[in-house]
Image: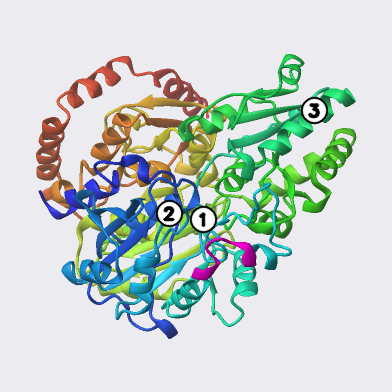
Amino acid sequence: MGFMKRVLRRIRGCFAESPEHLEGENLFGSFRAPGGGTDFMSRRRVLVLHHGRLTGGSRIFLKRWVREHSERYEIFILDFLRDETFALYCERQFLKHLQLNSPEAFRGLLEEHRIGFVFVNQLAETNVFQWIDALAGGPVPYEYFIHDYFCICPEHYFLLDAAGSYFGDSPERHFRDCPRGAEAGRLERFLSKAFRVTAPGEAARKIFASRYPGLKIEVVPHDSFCRLPNVYDASSARNPILTIGVLGAIGPHKGARVIEALAGKFRSGKNPVRIKVIGYTDKQASPAVLRKGILEITGKYSYRNLSSVISKSGISFFLFPSVWPETFSCVCEEILQSGYPILMFGLGAQQERIRNGEFGWTVPLQSGVRGLYGKILELESRRELILEKAAKIRGAFRETIDVVVPVFNGLACLQKCVESVLANTDTSCRLLIIDDASTDETVRGYLASLRNANPAVEMICLSNERNLGFVGTVNRGLKFGRNHCVILNSDTIVPPGWLSRLGDPIRRDPRIASVTPYSNRATICSFPEIDRSNDLPDGISSEELDRFFQKLGEGQWEEIPTGVGFCMMLNRNAIDEIGYFDEEIFGRGYGEENDWCLRAARRGYRNVHLQNLFVFHSEAGSFGEESEILKQAHIAELEKIYPDYGKKIQEYLRKDPCRRNREFVKRLVSAR
């Protein structure tokens, strides 16, 4: 199996025996040496310490780390199971179970596998002091990322006492009475000897700094880990009965008792307010509350259909009832990405995000249920306050889209393409122009001279040290990016307002993998004749033709068996789930986008043909006479991998579901 196949296999899952260990999305910054020097991990083997049974942000964080570093480093995962028993994995493969009951045993593990760096991803609910001592006293550098407060108090790593109350404001007595207080010195030594201690936010850093005043803690904020469409429905704030949402698996530390108490107040106060839990709580609500419809619990949900569930919920804003200072809240991220304001207690990372962005409301933790209840009554009587916050969120979460333009020679076409992107892009965009070691010196000179006058576009020019080919260059752009991504050939010209229209289907439906517009040369997305290479109609510019397609209106697309790569938007969630283009088979180009779209379809995604956008394609690529040979060879490869590929294409051409729309635009052209 080739290198790229191995990489894709790693990305598609993490642990062979326990795929549930790593789910969801997050970002992790790469390791770096102090002062921004060269990469510290020259030995290229990394051990990650993790507790696989714990869910939430740390697990999401780890999956992203594995995906971003697996090509460069050999990743070992040491997964805590129970007592002193661990499971060891390398990449996806389970290696063995082992006992680590002494510092010597842990040091032996590092030496046996020639580990050059250790990343400590999870400490909560572990019996870890043997290897904490080994790391602190050993030569291997390590980093600790703060995902919980185990190092503050191992017995109460949520900083909640036995009664479930937050003791962070007056922790001294709890530390003094902690059954594991004698281990505080070992924890302090472990932290002080770390190459780096990192927190995802200022709130977590301050809590650690209060316990360890001399400890240097670097704040590295999480990037956005999910990309959910804004599905906020303003009419929900005007309903006679105000529906408040709660999202997630709600146990005591997540505020289950808070929800119960609020539901009881709504029942006795006869307020026109209801609570809907999208997820579940640790126990069933009282029969009286359920009978009156005050509290609804939907049950477990899938991330894949979360946007659909939220959009149909009638929720006006969300309550985040957590009573501990979270280090990073995945649920908050999902709610805000979906466009909803949040009401919460004023503590932890959740407070930071809400206050800094003015995305909702906080009440003091000391005010408890009474404080939340009072704020809810105020919002029920002044619904305009809810809509104001929702509008602020919509503006703040305007989505950036990466546009990758692979370049190899072809200066004249490239200039027209870049000029059209800079002139006609109407939404936040990061333009990645990647020169694939062009042999034409004028191309490099042009890229060096580029100046950007469009404030919506961040322009980045990259150069490959050697020629990677079209697919390798595209993959470099996909890996460089963080957002939904458009692959745009350098021989295209885009019209005004193109990018917001191209991104619309994925914003509305997160299970769409790819979006392809119309073009004159785009096989099954061609105009005026399908599956042909067309010239523009006489006397019609591409921009005017696009205006005709806009008359078809928003929200119209048809499902297609595969996207077409001349101008194709890719859903970042699909990229993260199925991987990049296959360089091993399709490295020279042609067929790589078909393979990717078919892989996405196998995972339950859809590929769609957008109806209200036309992008000109000159098809002046750099393959020359080689193009037809590559096409035929790669079609044969596709049919080996997907035996029904040809049949699906022919069936689509026979049905031709977009014929009416093409005929409509043809009539507009004729009547011009």
Q: Label 1 crowding class (10 Å Cα cut-off): few <14, some 14-19, many 20+?
A: many
Distance from label 2 to label 3 (Cα)? 51 Å
Which of the labelled discs sits on residue 264, or is there none?
3
Relative to 643, 283 lies left or right: right
Quadrant location of residue 645? top left
Give the percent coordinates (x, y) of residue 407.
30, 61
Q: Judge left or right: residue 600 versus residue 289.
A: left
Near-viewer residue (308 or 222) = 222
Q: Nearer the viewer, mark 3 or mark 1?
A: 3
Between 436 and 3, the one lying in front of the other is 3
Q: Marks 2 and 1, Cα distance to the nearest angstrom?
A: 7 Å
Callout 2 amino acid? Val
Residue 667 is one of the magenta-drawn residues: no
Q: What percent of the width, then of the height, locates residue 471?
A: 24, 53
Report helix, strand or loop for mark 1: strand
Q: Do labels 2 and 1 touch, CB within 8 Å?
A: yes
Q: Residue at x 62, y 79 (%)?
A: 213
Q: Is residue 177 magenta?
A: yes
Disc 3 marks a residue whose amino acid type is Gly
Q: CA distance from mark 3 to mark 1?
A: 48 Å
Give the residues drawn in magenta, as a range: 175-183
Q: Which residue is mark 2?
A: 403
